[in-house]
Amino acid sequence: MTGQPDDASQIETLQDALDKATGDATPPARRRHGGRAGNVRGKGAVISQLPWTIPVNSDRPTEPLREEGVEAVHNGAMRVLEEIGIEFLHPEALDILKKAGCRVDGENVRMGRDFVMEMVEKAPSSFTITPRNPERTITIGGDHMVFGNVSSPPNCSDLDRGRRPGDRESYRDFIKMTQYFNCIHFAG
């Protein structure tokens, strides 16, 4: 280091002197604050991505299994629901399930196979969620595949700070990424 100013600072100093001498000094432009425009950090290159769309799955979900395999998975799930049960932590849910004929023991609920199949038959095969922007309507079910974030991971990681416990700043950045990328359809 020679103690001499670098070229950039010399140019700025010369430009300031020229502006003062000619009377062309203009006041600095006012900056906007807030909103997305106010976030100066991250004004980098735009990441190219495909347009926002809901992908459609042309494959059957259980195609890798033969019918016997699908039946074995179904029977295993029914056994868990009938014999082992599921823990429900919400008192109102426990009350509703008890009134519907399920066996409630504390917070553990066991459901009969017939009850489960009756409830599954009542569920729609698909439904839509319409946000404020109707062009971003999401269809859940059928052949549609939607992708969302997990919204509340206990830990986070990035290249600058590594792995660490999550905090508000990291969560804010996570939501910004969710809103930016067209391949993430919802936060939740």
Image (spheres, rainbow, N blue to C red):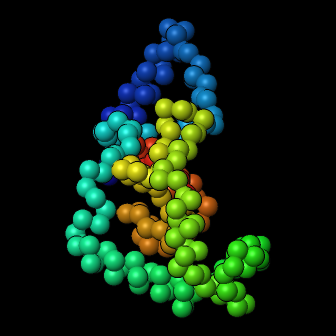
Label total for image: 0
Percent coordinates x, y for residue 31 in the rendering: 59, 28
Percent coordinates x, y for residue 133 in the rendering: 55, 33
Q: Quadrant of residue 95?
A: bottom right
- In this rendering, position of residue 99 left or right of residue 22: right
- In the picture shown, does residue 43 fall above or below 59? above
Q: Quadrant of residue 166?
A: bottom right
Q: Quadrant of the C terminus?
A: bottom right
- In this rendering, position of residue 11 left or right of residue 26: left
- In this rendering, position of residue 48 left or right of residue 107: left
Camera-side residue: 65 or 30? 65
Camera-side residue: 5 or 68? 68
Q: Can residue 75 be seen in this view?
A: yes
Percent coordinates x, y for residue 61 in the rendering: 31, 62
- In the picture shown, does residue 137 fall above or below 107? above
Identified at 70% across, 86% down, the residue is 104
Identified at 41% across, 84% down, the residue is 76
Percent coordinates x, y for residue 100 in the rendering: 70, 74
